[in-house]
Amino acid sequence: MDQPPQPEGFSQPPLRPEIVPEPIHTPPRRKSVFIRLLWIVIFLALLGSVTLNLLLFAVIGLAGFGALQDERQVQEKYYALNRHGRDKVAILSIEGTILGGEGFFRQQIDHARRDAKRGVLKAIVVRVNSPGGTITGSDYMLHHLRQLAEKERIPLVVSMGGVAASGGYYVSMCVGDTPRSIFAEPTTWTGSIGVLIPNYNFAELMERWGIRDDTIASGPLKTMGSFAREMTPEEKKVFQALVDDGFNQFKDAIKRGRPKFRGDPAALERVATGQIFTANQALESGLIDEIGFIEKAIDRAIRLADLDKENVKVVKYKAQPHLADLLLGQARAKPAFDIAALLEATTPRAYFLCTWLPAFARSAK
């Protein structure tokens, strides 16, 4: 084929094949692994938060419901003898400073009463390990223990722990006229029969700090026991009458629980000095019946109830924790010292207590 004429001076480059590169297809960009992990963490956190809130609502509901159920408050723990015995002997505990008397003690009493009415509970060992406490709390416990024994016709035996003094000894009088019914361990301290009303005079210290008491009262005896001034002779006379009345109540309880002293008041006066006694001294003076550990008290309770030891199951009452207690632990605990506790500590109050300084705690516990 003829080529068209070319302009003069024009030279055509040699023809070469044109190479067209193929288009590069970039794969879609994958999501970062970090982003995926972040979304997983956020999802798990939200799920955990929802679960935790639901669980807390359940705990609050169960705690409130459990407070209404007395049966849930006391748990029986197997202690000794035949685990499958048909007759039950229970160990009812009084531990620590006696305050209001309500709470776990009352729950133990109610639990024991239900078992006694069903014919399951045959005898009770009252385990006392307490330095005493308020007169009101001590008398409350003594009253309900006596009432339980009399109405349900079950014998009570006392087993003293490390200390069963003052109000702890007062409560031990629940056995009444039952012979050989108060046992103390070889190292027990007991006695401390008496009453005290703590009072402290900070007047000189307040004057040094420039603090003045301007309390306005309706009468001269309304501020009896104030720590801001020295006690007047009239106030001392009133307080002494309160102490004497409580002291007579203490001695009357001992006469009812220890027949020996009913016919020998002078012997009671010799031991009712506020003195602490060892187990040997208490045995010699007639404050207790025998020295022995809790097993000896259990054997005596079985004998008093006329039971076959081979068919006896001994249980110990203990507080049954709620789900809230298990999950929240000490977070639910109230502070041991607060304004209410301070106000109660400054309130004149009579104690059956083996100390010169009462516990800083609410008596409502």
Image: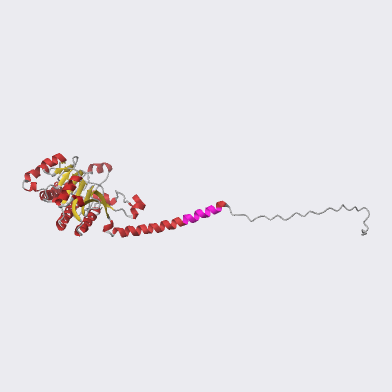
Q: Residue furthest left?
A: 263
Residue 313 is left or right of residue 238, and the answer is: right
Q: Is residue 328 magenta?
A: no
Give the residue drawn at x 29%, y 51%.
Answer: 339
The x and y percentages for residue 120 are 21, 57
Residue in front for this viewpoint, 149 or 239: 149
Residue numbers of the magenta segment: 35-46
Residue in front for this viewpoint, 329 or 280: 280
**Residue 273 occupies which quadrant of the picture?**
top left
Residue in front for this viewpoint, 302 or 166: 302
Q: How is the image coloured?
A: secondary structure
The x and y percentages for residue 333 are 32, 51
Give the residue drawn at x 55%, y 51%.
Answer: 34
Residue 325 is left or right of residue 204, and the answer is: right
Give the residue drawn at x 30%, y 58%.
Answer: 66
Please say if 60 is above or below 169: below
